[in-house]
Structure formats: structure tokens, C-alpha cells
Image (spheres, grey):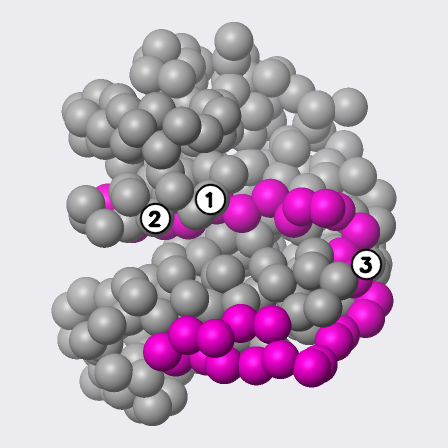
Amino acid sequence: MPPTLGLFALNLHSCAEPQVAARVAKLAEDLGYDSVWVGDHVVLPSPRVDPSPAEPDAPFLDPLVALAHLAAHTERIALGTGVVVLPQRNPLVLAKQLASVDVLSGGRLIFGAAAGYLEPEMRAVGVPPEGRGERADEYLAAMRSLWYDDKPAFHGRHVDFERVDAHPRPVQRPIPVVTGGHGPAALRRAARHADGWYGWMVGRRAGAELIPRVRALREEAGREPLHISVSPPRLPDAEFVRAYADLGVDRLIVVPPMGATASDLERFVEDHAPRRLGARPVA
């Protein structure tokens, strides 16, 4: 089956302008994209150092605030975080923010998360890079307790609470969770704790290696099949979409050229619409 298409970068560069983001999200919805996605960087190293993804003056709206804005200007399209750097966030505050977005959007949130990789950012916000994977796993489990348990509680190394509650609860039960990362620990996290895996900048050769690996880990965990989302490293065409479908990709999340003007971005969304690429449109 052909994959659906998502659209990345709805909170940065041109889409840091609220009117542009609203127009682009509505256009994507009308053209049959299944989802729009926002990135997450609280701060960026200045001056830029590898592996920072952008210059320090690149405009980056907060992902949860941006999704609340997009929720108000769309009706059907899913709203994804691609991805929240989970160890950098207080899990109870983040759970409240995400539940709020799910409520405001009528149950359209996809929660994408990862353990993070940009050490200068993590240290600036007071989170040691060491142990970030364990921290991410605990935070996710704690957030799920706050979302779904009658009496939320969690006791771990990095987060500990009981005798508290938070309402309103999410509309979706459960909120779809996708986790990112290409390393062994990240793939295990997706297989054991998520509903999907998000491969960022994964080419066809890497996809042919990583997708069977994460699916095998999923089978070992005894869970239902994993939903696979991929952002390819180059702009897709119809042949490209077919190749990713053959790899078992369920959703391609296309990444516009960084720094594109508003008009160029709208043209990109039209030129890469699902029907033009042979992807599966969503009504």
C-alpha cells in the first residue's frame, strides 16, 4: 500500500510567522497530507557547532505552542511533534501540554519523542547527556500514568510522584507515540515503548537495514506491528515513494528546503502533494 505523506517544519523558518504556518497547514490538509510536524530545539549553540541542525538565529517556535496554533486553523490533519527532546522537558508539565493540545485539536495529536543528541543544548537546560535514554524511558512511562491511570503515580530514579492528578485527560486513549533515533537503544525504545518509529533523514539503503531491525525487535517484544514514518534525505518523486512503500514505510514526512520563503513553501506543498507523488491521500 502506498504511504501517506506528512509535512515537516511547521514551526521554523518561514512557518515561525503565524499566518504562514496557518496557511501552509490548511493547504496541506486540503491537498490530502495526513499530518503536519514540528521540530524541537529550546536553544541552539552559538556559534554553531556540529551536529547542530541550524544557525543559532534560526527562528524556532516552541513545538507545543505551535501545534495549538495549528489546531485552531485546521480541522482534520494530524499534528505531530517530530520530535520532542524528552529528557529536556519536565514530564508532568509536558504531559499537561500534550494533553491540552490533544483536547484543543479534538484528538489529533501524534507525540514524537527522542532521547536527544545535542550536548550544548542539553547542558544549557540543565540536563546531563549521560543517562538520557533511561531518563526518556522513565518520563514516557510517568506521562502515560498521568494520562490514563485512575490514580496516577510513578516512582523512578528521575521522576517520582503520587497523590496528584491532572485534567482534562487526552481525548485519545491512547495518544499515538512515535520515537526517533537510529542507534540500538533508540530502536529498542521504539519496539518496546512506542506505537511507531520515526526515521529522520533515512535513505533507502539505511531504511533497508533499520526497518527490518526495528520490526524484529518489535516481534521479540510480542507487540502489534510498528507504524513506520520516515523523513527522506532528498525530495521525493513518484519512484522514490514506491521504493519506500516497498520497504514497508507507512508515512513519508517530507522536509521542505530550509529557509524557503512563504510562497516557495506553498509551491513546495502543492508540487509534493500526495496525488502528484502517488502517495495515499487522506480525505
Count up the numbered dots: 3
Q: Secondary structure at mark 1?
A: loop
Q: Nearer the viewer, mark 1 or mark 3?
A: 1
Q: Main secondary structure of the magenta part?
A: loop
Secondary structure beneath disc 3? Answer: helix
Query: Residue 146: horizontal and vertical position, in percent?
Result: 66, 67
Residue shown at the point (75%, 74%) measured from the top left: 166
Mark 2 element type? helix
First in residue order: circle 2 vs circle 1: 2
Question: What kind of residue is marked 2?
Answer: Arg
Residue position for label 2 = 189
Residue 103, disc: 3
Instruction: Provide the residue span drawn in magenta.
Output: 153-182
Q: Residues within 10 Å of mark 2 (few under 14, many from 20)?
A: many
Quarter of the image for residue 190 reads: top left
Amino acid, disc 1: Ala
> Does residue 143 lie above or below 128 as drawn?
above
Give the residue at mark 1. 194
Q: Position of residue 129 (x, y in %)?
A: 23, 76
Of the pair 90 and 11, the residue shown nearer to us: 90
